[in-house]
Image (spheres, grey):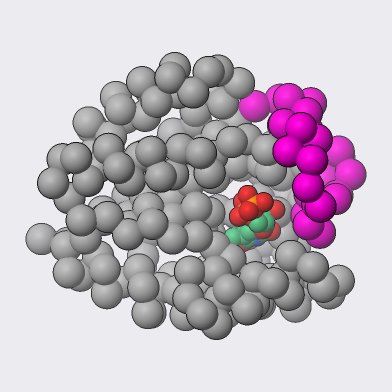
C-alpha cells in the first residue's frame, strides 16, 4: 500500500521544525517507516540549491524556478520512491511555501505558479498539510531569541511576512480537505495533543 505524504508549513519562526521529528517518531511508534525531509533541499543537489536560494540575491522568477527544480529532484529521487515502497514521508515545507512566499510575499504571477506546479508535481499532492499559524510579532520574537544569522527570507520586512501568512491562510481555506491550521502560539504539549488528534484521522 502506498504511504502517506505529510507536509509542514508556516511563516518563519512558527516553530514547525520542532514538531517534524516529534511527529515522525510518533508515527514510527505505530510501526510505520517514516522518511523526514525538507524543502528547499532533501537531495544532494537540492541542498546545494538551498544554499543559493537562502543566501544569493536573484530575480523572483529565477528563485521560483530553482525552488521547483529542487522540488522536481526531490519528488523523483526521494518522495515518490518512498511513497511507492509504502513508507510515509514527512516534509518540512513543500509547494504551498512557493505559493505563500514567491506568490503572496513577492507577488509572482499566479498563472506561472500554477503552470510550474502542474508540471513539477504532476498529480502529487500532500495527504495532509499542517499549517503552523501565529501572529507575526510572536514569530519575530522567536527568531530574535534564536540569536543566529538570518537568511534572505527571514531578513524580509514585516509586510512581506504578513502577506506570506495571509497567502497561507487563504490557501488553507481553499484546500480545507488536506490543510489544517494549527494555532502555533500555544505550548509544545498543547500543539502535540492537537497533532495526535489530527493524525488519528488519516
Ligand atoms: P526553512 O527550512 O523553514 O528555514 P529554517 O531552516 O530557517 O527553519 O525554510 C527556508 C526558507 O525558504 C523559508 O524562509 C521559506 C523559504 N521557501 C520559499 O520561499 N519558497 C519555497 O518554495 C520553500 C520550500 C521555502
Is residue 170 visible to the viewer in this orientation of the structure? Answer: no
Give the image quarter of residue 68: bottom right
Residue 100 location, x and y as percent? 66, 50
Q: Observer-nearest residue: 165 or 78?
A: 78
Query: Which residue is drawn at the image coordinates 38% and 57% (left, top)?
Result: 36
Q: Residue furthest front?
A: 147
List x then y, in percent, for residue 202.
23, 39
Position of 138 with respect to 14 (left or right) is: right
Span highlighted in magenta in the image: 134-160
Q: Residue at x 27, y 37 (%)?
A: 26
User: Up-down: is 159 above or below 44?
Assistant: above
Who is closer to the viewer here, 124 or 55?
A: 55
Q: Residue at x 24, y 42 (%)?
A: 27
Q: Per the image, is 130 magenta? A: no
Q: Name the foreground residue: 201 vs 122.
A: 201
Q: Quadrant of residue 69?
A: bottom right
Ligand 1, seen in the image, is in the quarter at: bottom right
Magenta span has 153? yes
Task: Indicate left or right for 124 with 162 as reference.
Answer: left
Image quadrant where residue 144 sits:
top right
In the image, 36: left or right of 131?
left
Residue at 40 percent of width and 73 percent of height? 75
Outermost residue to the left: 1
Residue 74 location in percent, x, y? 45, 74
Total tally of numbered discs in the picture: 0
Query: Could you tell whether 74 is left or right of 138 in the image?
Result: left
* Residue 130, percent from left and from top: 45, 39
Residue sitting farthest toward the right: 157
Q: Nearer the viewer, residue 157 or 98?
A: 157
196 shown above or below 157: above
Residue 188 visible in the displayed image: yes
Viewport quadrant of the N terminus:
bottom left
Amino acid at each position: 500500500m502506498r504511504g502517506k505524504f505529510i507536509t509542514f508549513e508556516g511563516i518563519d519562526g512558527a516553530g514547525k521544525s520542532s514538531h517534524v521529528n516529534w511527529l515522525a517518531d510518533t508515527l514510527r511508534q505505530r510501526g510505520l517507516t517514516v522518511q523526514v525531509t525538507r524543502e528547499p533541499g532533501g537531495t544532494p543537489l537540492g541542498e546545494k540549491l538551498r544554499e543559493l536560494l537562502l543566501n544569493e540575491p536573484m530575480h523572483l522568477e529565477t528563485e521560483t524556478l530553482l525552488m521547483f527544480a529542487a522540488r522536481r529532484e526531490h519528488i523523483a529521487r526521494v518522495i515518490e520512491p518512498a511513497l511507492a515502497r509504502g513508507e510515509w514521508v514527512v516534509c518540512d515545507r513543500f509547494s504551498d511555501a512557493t505559493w505563500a512566499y514567491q506568490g503572496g510575499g513577492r507577488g509572482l504571477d499566479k498563472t506561472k505558479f500554477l503552470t510550474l506546479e502542474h508540471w513539477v508535481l504532476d498529480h502529487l499532492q500532500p495527504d495532509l498539510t499542517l499549517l503552523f499559524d501565529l501572529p507575526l510579532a510572536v514569530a519575530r520574537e522567536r527568531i530574535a531569541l534564536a540569536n543566529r544569522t538570518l537568511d534572505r527570507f527571514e531578513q524580509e520586512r514585516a509586510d512581506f511576512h504578513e502577506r506570506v501568512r495571509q497567502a497561507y491562510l487563504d490557501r488553507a481555506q481553499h484546500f480545507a480537505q488536506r490543510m489544517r491550521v494549527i494555532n502555533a502560539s500555544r505550548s509544545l504539549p498543547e500543539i502535540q495533543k492537537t497533532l495526535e488528534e489530527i493524525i488519528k484521522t488519516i
